[in-house]
Image (cartoon, rainbow, N blue to C red):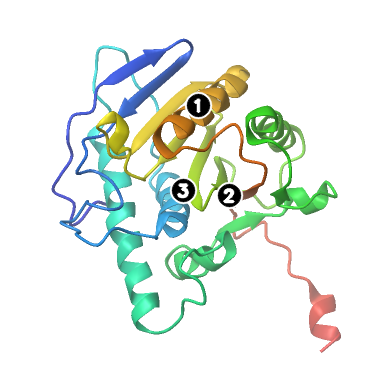
């Protein structure tokens, strides 16, 4: 899987209430991994690619208090960072970037070239909502994630792969992070590939039980405020849902052909 990733550091857990979290070394982030010197705006591609790789290689996210993260998980994140930066650089060099910060659908296009059945689940539209949520992040992120997870459990997309995980990208304050719900471990995790220099860390990963998703969101928004100067007070953010389709369950829409 991780063909060119050599750097897989031991990352030991920390605990904050019900949230277990892991702080990666400062050199392990989207801005520095792979001997980068110019920083990176590839967070959206990295988040989408991380999600696809976690699903394709069926990588569980879980950890024990006395053990470091599995090398498989660390290598998966590292490979997504390096490969995501490479994809972003190629888009920039070929003039395909209309804006330095890609949206999720723009990031999904190159990822689907490698993983064609990794797809958006347009749940927000199905619920009559917009992906862009104009509400206080600190007050509503947990509520919205809980609603998305409940729909995944009780009204999932008909064409989802049987063992599919749910991936939710959060775009807030120009930064994209990834939330992952894995039903087999009954936990929700977040993966943030950005550097967090104010706490002496690179990327970070945090996780809690699914019934405490609001606690995880509160922890994340407070960490964002401490590291980036904005978090609970952010008044607009975007959520998008991603999942892996089962090609045998995809229903072709013949009406679109008849209309052409």
Q: Residue at x 52, y 77 (%)?
A: 98
For the question of whether residue 158 can be seen, the reply is no
| Cβ–Cβ under 8 Å for marks 1 and 3 | no
Is residue 255 shown left or right of residue 211?
Answer: right
Q: Earlier in the sequence, mark 3 or mark 2?
A: 3
- Distance between the Cα atoms at labels 1 and 3? 24 Å
Query: Which picture quadrant has residue 232?
Result: top right
Task: Find disc 1 in the rendering and name its residue.
Answer: 222
Where does the image place residue 115, in percent across and percent down from the top left? Answer: 46, 62
Is residue 135 shown left or right of residue 54?
Answer: right
Q: Is residue 144 above or below residue 89?
A: above
Where does the image place residue 243, in percent across and percent down from the top left? Answer: 58, 49
Q: Secondary structure at mark 1?
A: helix
Q: Nearer the viewer, residue 13 or 110?
A: 13
Q: Residue at x 28, y 38 (%)?
A: 197
Q: Quadrant of the C terminus?
A: bottom right
Q: Secondary structure at mark 2?
A: strand
- Distance between the Cα atoms at labels 1 and 2? 28 Å
Q: Residue at x 24, y 62 (%)?
A: 38
Disc 3 crowd rating (10 Å Cα; few below 14, some 14-19, many 20+) is: many
Q: Earlier in the sequence, mark 1 or mark 2?
A: 1
- Distance between the Cα atoms at labels 3 and 2? 8 Å
Query: Which picture quadrant has residue 181?
Result: top right
Task: Find disc 3 in the rendering and name its residue.
Answer: 51
Task: Find disc 2 in the rendering and name its residue.
Answer: 243
Q: Nearer the viewer, mark 1 or mark 2?
A: 1
Q: Secondary structure at mark 3?
A: helix
Where does the image place residue 201, in percent across and percent down from the top left? Answer: 27, 34
| Cβ–Cβ under 8 Å for marks 1 and 2 | no
């Amino acid at each position: 899987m991780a063909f060119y990733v050599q750097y897989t550091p031991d990352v030991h857990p920390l605990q904050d209430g019900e949230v277990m979290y892991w702080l990666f070394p400062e050199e392990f982030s989207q801005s520095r991994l792979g001997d980068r010197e110019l920083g990176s705006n590839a967070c959206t591609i990295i988040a989408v690619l991380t999600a696809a790789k976690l699903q394709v290689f069926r990588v569980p996210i879980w950890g024990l208090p006395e053990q470091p993260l599995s090398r498989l998980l660390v290598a998966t994140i590292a490979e997504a960072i390096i490969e995501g930066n490479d994809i972003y650089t190629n888009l920039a060099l070929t003039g395909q970037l209309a804006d330095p910060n890609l949206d999720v659908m723009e990031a999904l296009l190159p990822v689907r070239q490698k993983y064609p059945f990794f797809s958006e689940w347009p749940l927000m539209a199905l619920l009559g909502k917009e992906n862009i949520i104009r509400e206080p992040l600190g007050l509503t992120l947990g509520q919205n994630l809980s609603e998305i997870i409940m729909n995944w459990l009780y009204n999932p997309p008909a064409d989802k792969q049987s063992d599919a995980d749910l991936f939710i990208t959060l775009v807030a304050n120009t930064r994209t992070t990834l939330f992952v719900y894995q039903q087999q471990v009954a936990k929700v995790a977040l993966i943030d590939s950005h550097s967090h220099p104010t706490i002496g860390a690179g990327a970070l990963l945090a996780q809690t039980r699914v019934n405490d998703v609001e606690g995880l969101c509160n922890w994340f928004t407070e960490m964002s405020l401490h590291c980036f100067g904005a978090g609970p007070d952010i008044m607009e953010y975007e959520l998008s849902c991603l999942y892996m389709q089962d090609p045998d369950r995809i229903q072709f829409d013949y009406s679109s052909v008849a209309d052409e």
